Image: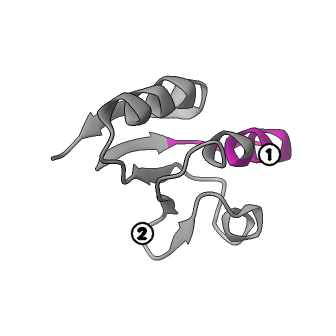
Amino acid sequence: MYTASILLSSIEAVKKFVTLTNRYDFPISLSTDRYDVDAKSIMGIFSLDLSKPLRVEAHSEDPERAEDFLRRLQPFCVEQVSSQP
């Protein structure tokens, strides 16, 4: 599992983020302290409090694809990316 803290500060940022997540076939979730939603769902994302950083979890067994996702995720990141086996 790969995690990062991101900030989606505008509607345009949410659209770009959803477009990015939908390029990948592995599960990606987005969470706050209370809620966990599918990061590929624009409706799910808009149900979260977007004024605070969100946690992204990418559940990929292919390290190359996961690292590609994390590289593309960098413009949204507010905290360093980490990985857990």
Q: Position of residue 41 (x, y in %)?
A: 69, 64
Magenta stretch: includes residue 17? yes
Residue 32 drawn in magenta: no
The numbered mark, 1 or 2, whose residue comes first in the sequence reads 1
Q: In the rendering, which numbered label is found on residue 33? A: 2
Query: Which residue is found at the position 60% from the left and 25% from the top?
Result: 75
Q: Position of residue 30 (x, y in %)?
A: 51, 59
Q: Residues within 10 Å of mark 2 (few under 14, many from 20)?
A: few
Q: Kindly report which numbered mark, 1 or 2, lies closer to the viewer in this rendering.
A: 1
**Residue ID at (47%, 26%):** 68
- Position of residue 79 relative to residue 44, above or below, is above
Residue at x 74% of width, y 43% of height: 19
Question: 20 or 65, which lies in front?
Answer: 65
* Labelled disc at residue 73: none
> Mark 1 belongs to which amino acid?
Lys
Residue at 56%, 70% in the rendered image: 37
Query: Residue 59: in sight, yes or no?
Result: yes
Residue 15 appears at what percent x and percent y? 80, 45
